[in-house]
Image (spheres, rainbow, N blue to C red):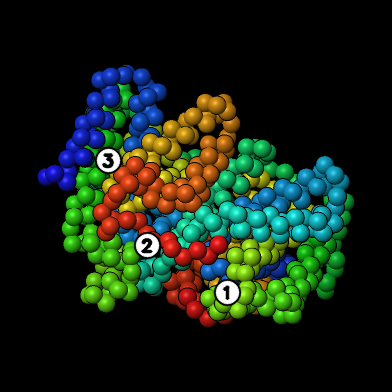
Amino acid sequence: MKAYLPIAVAVALFAAVPFLTASNVVLNFLVMALLIALAGQGWNLLGGYGGQYSFGHAAFFGTGAYVTAILQVRYGVNAWLGLVIGVAAGALVGAAIGALSFRSGLKGSYFSLVTLAFAEVLRITASVAPITGAGVGTLIKLDLRPEAFQFQSRAPFYWIALGLVGASLIVVRAIERSRFGAYLVAVRENENAAKALGVDVFMVKLGAMTISAAITAAAGCFYAQYFLFLDAAIAYGPWISIDALLAPIVGGAGMLFGPLIGALVIKTLGEATKLVTGGAPGLDLVIYGVVLVAVVGLAPRGIAGLLSGWTPRQFRPGSSADQNHG
Amino acid sequence: MLSPVILVPAVLNGLMTGAVYALIALGLTLIYGVLHIINFAHGALLTAAMFAAFFAYTLLGIDPYLAAVFLTPLFFLFGYALQRFIIGPAAHGEDRNFLLVTLGLAIVIENTLLYAFRGDTRTINLPYAFDTIEVGTAFLAVPRVIAFVAVIAVAVALWAIMQWTDTGKAIRAVAKEKLGAELSGIDVAHIYAVTFGLGTACVAVAACLLIPTYYVNPTAGDAFVLIAFTIVVLGGMGSIVGALIGGLFVGVVESLSSVFLGESLGQIGIFVMFIAMLLVRPSGLFGERA
């Protein structure tokens, strides 16, 4: 159980926040950070541990969000059930995209490209399909009852987001310690060597992508309940694909707490930029881009890597970068 | 519906549009062929060049075709510097890092433009933008004919550079065998940067050719680059001939599908073709390897 102690400590610390402040601004900020941490943890499993860099995690986020919303709005399904079905739908989309791409042997840049293209196809489809409300978007009716996954105050939303993040941390830690997790890291480090040692590379990648998609879809479901509004640009837009990869990269890809640390850092930077510039559009994203380039260039192991200074060799993200292409 | 009165102009117009696509794809495929990286900043660089051409006209009154004469070398230098001083050092030679760094640059460039010029869509009004040339039954817009001819000229010039200059030979050597090239005294970091510069210069020419008939806003380049990715995958990553033929082909397909299917479905058609191509034959029609 020692392996899970840091998760318990982190979740307990976060859980205490609503008792210290009732400020909606603070809670709203933390909810958004947790949302990105959750979406990012999904990316982290596939990208950080598995080395498969998806540029289209919006495909899963959006599917989770739309399935939850549409089931409620059009079919009167309970929101909590919608959450479960949304996560399952996200996992299914992940498995489908994964099966298609990995069977064709797409890796590296090709994999990034194809995931990006899938997310864009879904975005364009959602922006014209009648079931998503097309250009108008989907509005979930206000119904402030816990049974409907809606609350008067922010605190319950915050705890639920925290619960989801906690669950994702436990899942990823369990995978980290399992045989499957070791296979996954082996595939990242050297796919051919892993294959030679008898690892079923296709199944390992597919499994990672399915779980990864499920985690990110959970973030989408939560988003739908929290904001009660979706359109194609929100659900399937590039913003979430970028945030989902930025958080783990900045925090430390292939490290359990990378996405959480990264999400807090980039959200803080984003808010700080908005404060300084008075909410001018674009500037917060400029900072994100600069941070991304700087982290990749100066701290390839992310903030968690800098802080720890020491990590077990097997969980180092990427292979060592001795080569210099200039 | 299949009357030649509709088909011939659609095909000709598709070829004209496709030529500009081909030029953008050419820059992308050149960079891929030598550096073996997908440049995710290509679209943002195109947008930046379109803004440059736009302001050259509105502020300085320079005709976009004239602006190409100084914007092309300027963007060559910009691309050179980006690769030499930012992308190369930051990526530490790892493919995954190249992806992330160019993605980061794309975010920076696009949002700097958004911050500076807001999301407004702008166009310029050239006196000759609506002039047409009659070719058989088809009327072709003059700017598109100019674009078509210019793209052919650029492609020939690029081919000549690659074929006959020392730099071109060095680029081909690095593309084929990086270590061997390095051992025979070629400065690989320099050649990488030159290639990236050439790719960026292609985008600058494309921007000057586009701006007379197209609009610019901070995300204007994205639409073209997704098409360019499709073309590059279709033509084979790194293949210059493939990019040209692929560009013309996609232009015609798009033109015909918007005649028969309407605008938004035409857009999906390109993505579906892209995904299908990646899944079925990632090495493309003219590519050597995946």
What numbered label is drawn on residue B182?
1
**In this picture, residue A283 sits left or right of residue A70:** right
**Tag of residue A165:** 3
Looking at this view, name the residue that lies furthest to the left: A1
Can you say which quadrant of the picture contains the N terminus of chain B? bottom right
> How far is disc 3 from disc 1 in space, using C-alphas?
48 Å
Would you say residue A260 is visible in this rendering?
yes
State which chain disc 3 sits on: A
Is residue A97 shown left or right of residue B162? left
Dot 1, how many residues are within 10 Å of its Cα: few (below 14), some (14-19), or many (20+)?
Answer: some
User: Residue A195's image quarter?
Assistant: bottom left
Q: Position of residue B257 (x, y in %)?
A: 60, 66
- Camera-side residue of A297 and B241: A297
Any part of residue A240 in sight: no
The answer to whether tags 2 and 3 share a subunit is yes
Asked whether the residues under the numbered discs 2 and 3 touch, taking CB atoms below 8 Å apart as contact, a structural biologist would say: no
Q: Which residue is mark 2?
A: A319
Amino acid found under the numbered disc labelled 3: Val
Corner quadrant of residue B173: bottom right
Q: Is residue A322 above or below residue A5?
A: below
Picture layout, residue B113 above or below residue B16: above
